[in-house]
Image (spheres, rainbow, N blue to C red):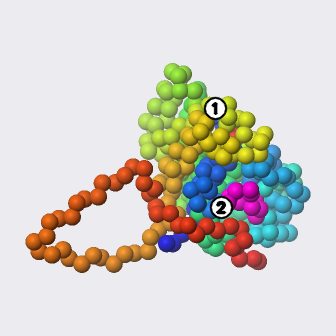
């Protein structure tokens, strides 16, 4: 079984749309499916760090890595949960905008520091939680990723917000990251009874087609309570509506973003001449798209230096 690490930025220039909640719970649900995950918290507010049960620690973030003071392997922290690792945020990360602004290679810095982590194959998914602005940190994050996942609320002017970020993606494709893809759009905090909600979702689906995830995350009080407990809702209350939605979303996400590929199988011998044709296997919708690989990895298996 070969593994190909996927780097995904979760971004939207708007704050409060559910980016961090999606990072934390997607990562948690993927790790529960034995996918090795690294979350990188790029927001100085550190909500993803706290939501994954870690404390802020001075000097443990992407900031010293961007300045060259530390190696990326030195800031990867395990969480309480298997397969779930994080590069935390801290107040110093607020200086990253300034640090990047002073550098000529500003758009390549994050990509360059992540490239050995990606190449090591230690993780299935590296998920970046972006700050809510179209600043240099978010732009360099998008320059470093394979694709961008956009959480959006289903509200008035949602299309305008989506247009802003998809324009940024187009600009990066024309420049520093020609292979950057729109991973998809996921609706968050959805109140399914509101007429406006269904109208907005229909409008966005008409425009973005299958890029819009089928799974919609409902507004759910357990989701908003979980961060104060330092535990993703998918672990805190796995039966809540919010947790069920994030688990279904992770399933859909894995199917659209496979990271494990079976080694090529030799072709079967030709069938005996008079034999009955074998029954066609009926695909089971509940079967995981890629076979499980019990071997999981953590930051410990990363090459140092
Ligand atoms: N599905 C949901 N149901 C209820 N509250 C939610 C849900 N998703 C997010 N929230 C709450 O909304 C606020 C903003 O979410 P957050 O993920 O921090 O957004 P962002 O990272 O885009 O700023 C937080 O207080 C969070 O707990
Ligand atoms: Mg956030």
Q: Is residue 75 visible?
A: yes
Residue 181 among those drawn in magenta = no
Q: Which residues are magenta?
A: 76-87
Determine the CA span between mark 2 and mark 1. Answer: 26 Å
Q: Residues within 10 Å of mark 2 (few under 14, many from 20)?
A: many
**Quadrant position of ligand 2:** top right
Secondary element at image label 1: loop
Q: Is residue 97 left or right of residue 238?
A: right
Compared to residue 77, the image places residue 162 above or below, namely above
The yes-or-no answer for disc 2 within 8 Å of ligand 1 is no
Compared to residue 180, the image places residue 214 above or below, namely above
The residue beneath circle 1 is 220
Q: Residues within 10 Å of mark 1 (few under 14, many from 20)?
A: some
Q: Point out residue 3 in the picture as x, y percentages from the top left corner.
A: 54, 69
Q: In the image, which disc is placed on residue 83?
A: 2
Q: Residue visible at 39% across and 49% down?
A: 285
Q: Residue visible at 25% across and 59% down?
A: 280
């Amino acid at each position: 079984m070969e593994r190909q690490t996927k780097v995904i930025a979760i971004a939207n220039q708007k704050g409060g749309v559910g980016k961090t909640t999606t990072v934390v719970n997607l990562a948690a649900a993927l790790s529960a499916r034995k996918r090795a995950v690294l979350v990188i918290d790029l927001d100085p507010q550190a909500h993803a760090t706290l939501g994954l049960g870690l404390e802020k620690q001075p000097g443990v973030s992407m900031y010293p890595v961007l300045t060259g003071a530390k190696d990326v392997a030195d800031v990867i922290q395990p969480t309480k949960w298997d397969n779930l690792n994080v590069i935390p945020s801290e107040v110093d990360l607020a200086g990253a905008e300034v640090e990047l602004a002073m550098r000529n290679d500003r758009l390549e810095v994050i990509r360059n520091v992540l490239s050995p982590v990606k190449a090591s194959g230690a993780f299935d998914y590296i998920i970046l939680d972006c700050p809510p602005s179209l600043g240099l940190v978010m732009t360099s994050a998008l320059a470093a990723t394979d694709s961008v996942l956009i959480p959006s609320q289903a509200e008035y002017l949602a299309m305008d917000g989506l247009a802003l970020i998809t324009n940024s993606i187009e600009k990066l494709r024309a420049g520093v990251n020609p292979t950057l893809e729109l991973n998809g759009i996921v609706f968050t905090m959805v109140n399914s009874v509101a007429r406006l909600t269904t109208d907005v979702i229909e409008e966005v689906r008409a425009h973005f087609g299958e890029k819009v995830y089928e799974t919609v995350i409902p507004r759910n009080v357990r989701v908003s309570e979980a961060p104060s407990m330092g535990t993703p809702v998918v672990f805190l209350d796995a039966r809540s509506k919010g947790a069920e939605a994030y688990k279904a979303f992770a399933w859909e996400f894995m199917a659209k973003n496979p990271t494990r590929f079976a080694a090529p199988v030799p072709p079967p011998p030709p069938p005996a001449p008079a034999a009955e044709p074998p029954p066609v296997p009926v695909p089971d919708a509940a079967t995981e798209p890629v076979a499980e690989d019990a071997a999981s990895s953590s930051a410990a298996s990363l090459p140092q230096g």
